[in-house]
Image (cartoon, rainbow, N blue to C red):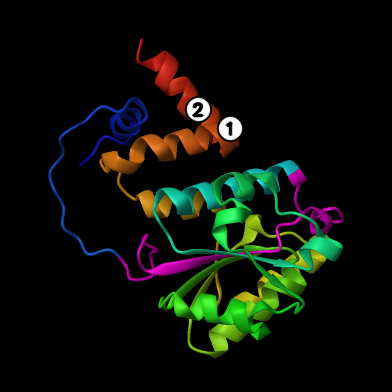
Amino acid sequence: MKNPILSCSAFLLGITVAFPAFAQKPSPELLTPSNHVLVMIDHESQMAFPVENIDIEELRNNVGLLAGGSKIFKVPTIITTVAEESFSGPVFPEIEEIYPKASSNYIDRTTMNAWEDGPAHKAITGAGKKKIVIAGLWTSVCIVGPVLSAIQDGYEVYVITDGCGDTSEQAHEMAIQRMIQKGAKPMTATQYVLELQRDWARAETYGPVTSLFKKYGGAYGIGIQYAHEVIKH
């Protein structure tokens, strides 16, 4: 049996520790870099102004984790906006930094439900993935619409609850409950990135992932920084 303390310290310090190999087959419910498409909807400045269910700095950090994680693991990622130039404004800097507008083909819409927008629907379904991960603003409007529509069309949909925001706690929570009742699977931004990493022995993504958490991971990121810089001494 693995020593959980030793195992945790080993990953934080980048130490390779040999344990017996296990070959259990993981659940098909789990996300992998190749089995889903990430859709980030309307993370724009004007849409964020009235958000009340989550602190805006926390929301931005979670968005940074999502964008950064999807980039590290090469997940097909679709950025869609609503009335960007005439009403809602630019996407969060955390998205623009990872997926620059000039090269990332943002899809601007007039519809509140991205599933009803021709180009957005084509981009999402054209990725050829049966699993869709969605986050955005506002939960009760621009997230409920595509989530319920995609489920109706036979897709497995995961909602990043702390990557979504709404005008009140109640609006957000009622929307999340409504989606769960129809089969949506809730998860957090941190859970999303760690589920893709899955094994700290995956050296190719170990460094980028821990660096991402140092930047956007709050207390967890500070813990990783501490471990890297202090415990090793």
* Residue shown at 35% from the left, 15% from the top: 232
* Amino acid, disc 2: Gly
Q: Which numbered marker is on residue 150? A: none
Residue 129, image quadrant? bottom left
Against 130, residue 214 (above or below) is: above
Q: Nearer the viewer, residue 150 or 195?
A: 150
Q: Which numbered marker is on residue 223? A: 2
Q: State the image coordinates of residue 186 (x, y, percent, origin top left).
A: 56, 65
Against 11, residue 198 (above or below) is: below
Q: Nearer the viewer, residue 165 or 181?
A: 165
Q: State the image coordinates of residue 71 (x, y, percent, origin top left).
A: 46, 51
Q: Please check the rendered image and state whether residue 41 is part of the magenta-colored stretch, yes or no.
A: yes
Q: Are marks 1 and 2 in contact (CB under 8 Å)?
A: yes
Name of the residue lying farthest toward the front = 102
**Magenta stretch in the rendered image:** 27-56
- Quarter occupied by the N terminus: top left
* Amino acid, disc 1: Ala
* Residue shown at 76% from the left, 46% from the top: 56
Q: In this figure, which residue is indicated by the disc labeled 1?
A: 219
State left or right for residue 65 relative to residue 41: left
- Answer few, some or many: residues within 10 Å of disc 2's Cα (few below 14, many 20 plus, some between 14 and 19): some
Q: Please check the rendered image and state whether residue 172 is part of the magenta-colored stretch, yes or no.
A: no
* Residue shown at 39% from the left, 16% from the top: 231
* Prevailing SS of the magenta stretch: loop
**Would you say residue 108 is visible in this rendering?**
yes
Q: State the image coordinates of residue 158 (x, y, percent, origin top left).
A: 53, 69
**Would you say residue 188 is visible in this rendering?**
no
Label 1, label 2: how far apart the Cα atoms are: 6 Å
